[in-house]
């Protein structure tokens, strides 16, 4: 991260009470060996690796009074259009991915929803499309969203683009973003950093929020 980007990350994270950590699709079907991806032979190692790191980051950001939003992907025949059905013919196993009410749709082991957190369910790649996320963020005075979760080139990418179009400041903690294809993930993060978001590390976010805390206390 260059000096200007570092300065801008500090700027957009300077008010933790106006910041939300949006955790995307950290569910068993994406992250656990017994999930749909794991059973299907998909390489979930990057997703599994970040589970405890996301848990730790979320706990630290809660202590800074940031809003925590858990986004859960759900699949239901009621939300499958003819266009989606045609695309699914190339990946039929996705019809069983994160089925509503199934164990695979639950958060990965080690992640927990705490009092005060928000849970948003989605049926498309973007956490904003067809959900209440934008309204919830605006109702809570949120200006900056910090995105973590999976996948870099799928739901994280699409959510980041929509957040930018909706005039949020978008920060992506790259070390807390999963994927099943490293090549596509890196290309997505590079493109997001150029056009839609500030891509940095979770340590950068924590440093920015931590630096803001004493100043906020002094003003109070």
Image (cartoon, helix red, strand yellow):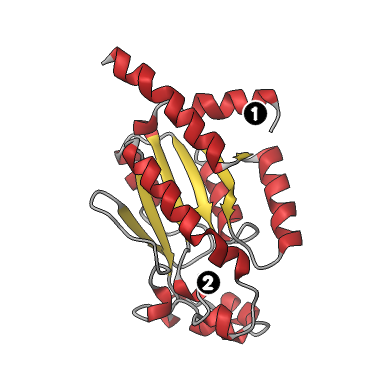
From this viewpoint, is residue 165 visible?
A: no
Label number found at residue 5 = 1
Q: Quadrant of the C terminus?
A: top left
Q: In the image, residue 106 lies at what x, y percent?
A: 38, 72
* 194 or 150, nearer to the observer: 150
State the residue at coordinates (56%, 62%). Answer: 49
State the residue at coordinates (35%, 54%). Answer: 132
Work out how far the residue at label 2 is from the one at label 1, CA to CA, in angstroms: 31 Å
State the residue at coordinates (37%, 25%). Answer: 213
From this viewpoint, is residue 4 visible?
A: yes
Q: In the image, residue 144 lies at what x, y percent?
A: 46, 36
Q: Secondary structure at mark 1?
A: helix
Q: In the image, residue 81 lies at what x, y percent?
A: 52, 76
Q: Is residue 8 above or below residue 150?
A: above
Q: With 209 as the anchor, is 1 left or right in this view? A: right
Q: How many marks?
A: 2
* 62 or 187, nearer to the observer: 62
Q: Is residue 44 above or below residue 138?
A: below
Label number found at residue 30 = 2
Q: Which numbered disc, 2 or 1, marks the residue that appears first in the sequence?
A: 1
Q: In the image, residue 177 lies at what x, y percent?
A: 58, 54
Q: With 156 as the anchor, is 68 left or right in this view? A: left
């Amino acid at each position: 991260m260059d000096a200007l980007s570092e300065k801008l990350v500090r700027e957009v994270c300077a008010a933790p009470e106006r910041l939300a950590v949006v955790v995307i699709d950290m569910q068993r079907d994406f992250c656990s060996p017994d999930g749909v991806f794991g059973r299907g032979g998909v390489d979930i190692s990057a997703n599994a690796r970040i589970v405890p790191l996301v848990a730790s980051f979320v706990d630290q950001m809660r202590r800074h009074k940031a809003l925590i939003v858990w986004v859960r992907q759900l699949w239901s025949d009621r939300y499958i259009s003819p266009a989606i059905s045609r695309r699914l013919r190339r990946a039929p196993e996705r019809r069983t991915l994160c089925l509503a009410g199934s164990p695979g749709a639950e958060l990965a082991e080690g992640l927990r929803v705490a009092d005060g957190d928000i849970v948003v369910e989605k049926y498309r790649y973007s956490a904003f499309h067809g959900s209440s996320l934008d309204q919830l963020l605006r109702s809570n005075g949120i200006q900056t969203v910090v995105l973590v979760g999976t996948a870099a080139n799928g739901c994280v990418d699409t959510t980041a683009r929509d957040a930018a179009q909706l005039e949020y400041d978008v920060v992506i903690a790259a070390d807390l973003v999963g994927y099943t294809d490293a090549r596509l993930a890196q290309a997505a993060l590079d493109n997001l950093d150029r056009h839609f978001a500030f891509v940095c590390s979770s340590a950068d976010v924590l440093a920015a929020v931590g630096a803001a805390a004493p100043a906020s206390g002094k003003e109070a």
